[in-house]
Image (tube, rainbow, N blue to C red):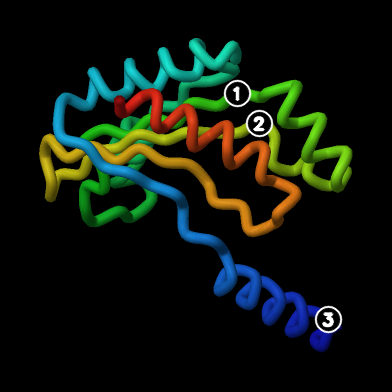
């Protein structure tokens, strides 16, 4: 059992080490304006937002409860949604790509850089996920233009 636990720990660390950095772009402006632009870009792509997650508020609210020592975000929101078209393509390529749905675009501002808003999404190393990457890149580009 100890060998299995050690092997699992090594696998988890190796997976974390190979995790892709997210795809991000930054812009100057109001967080609310940029978040609204992301929301509009998702809707304009013909998608339905399944969830709007106020991650920044949750982390601020629970900071003391979990031993947090610093404010991470001024604002941080994640929008989740799915695309029947992109999902069909990526899951026909590999049924296990189900794990990635719903997809998300995040928007955040940090206390260290007020007015500098970061917009991004998860990076997918698997070439089968190209349709999702293109969808997410298009949403971010639309929001920032």
- Asked whether disc 1 touches disc 2, contact meaning CB atoms under 8 Å apart, the reply is yes
The residue pinned by badge 2 equals: 102
Q: Earlier in the sequence, mark 1 or mark 2?
A: 1
Secondary structure of the residue carrying tag 1 is strand
Instruction: In this rendered view, identify the residue nearer to me: 34 or 128.
Output: 128
Residue at 66% x, 24% y: name it: 82
User: Residue, x 51% and y 12% (percent of image)?
Assistant: 43
Is any atom of residue 31 visible in this view?
A: yes
Eyeballing the image, is 11 above or below 37?
below
Considering only order in the chain, which callout, 3 or 2, is on the residue closer to the N terminus? 3
Residue that badge 1 annotates: 81
Number of numbered markers: 3
Give residue 5's quadrant in the image. bottom right
Q: CA distance from mark 1 to mark 3?
A: 37 Å
Q: Are marks 1 and 3 in contact (CB under 8 Å)?
A: no
Going from the N terminus, do you reach mark 1 or mark 3 first?
A: 3
Q: Is residue 30 above or below residue 73?
A: above
**Residue of label 3:** 4
Q: Nearer the viewer, mark 2 or mark 3?
A: 2
Rounded to the nearest angstrom, the CA distance separating label 2 from label 3 is 32 Å
Residue 119 in the image: above or below residue 23: above
């Amino acid at each position: 059992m100890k060998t299995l636990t050690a092997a699992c720990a090594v696998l988890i660390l190796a997976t974390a080490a190979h995790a892709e950095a997210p795809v991000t772009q930054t812009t100057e402006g109001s967080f609310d304006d940029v978040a609204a632009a992301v929301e509009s870009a998702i809707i304009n792509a013909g998608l339905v937002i399944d969830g709007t997650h106020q991650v920044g508020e949750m982390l601020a609210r629970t900071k003391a409860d979990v031993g947090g020592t610093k404010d991470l975000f001024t604002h941080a929101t994640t929008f989740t949604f799915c695309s029947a078209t992109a999902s069909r393509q990526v899951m026909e390529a590999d049924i296990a790509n189900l794990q990635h749905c719903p997809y998300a675009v995040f928007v955040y501002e940090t206390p260290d850089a007020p007015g500098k808003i970061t917009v991004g999404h998860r990076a997918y190393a698997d070439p089968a996920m190209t349709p999702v990457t293109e969808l997410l890149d298009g949403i971010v580009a639309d929001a920032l233009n």
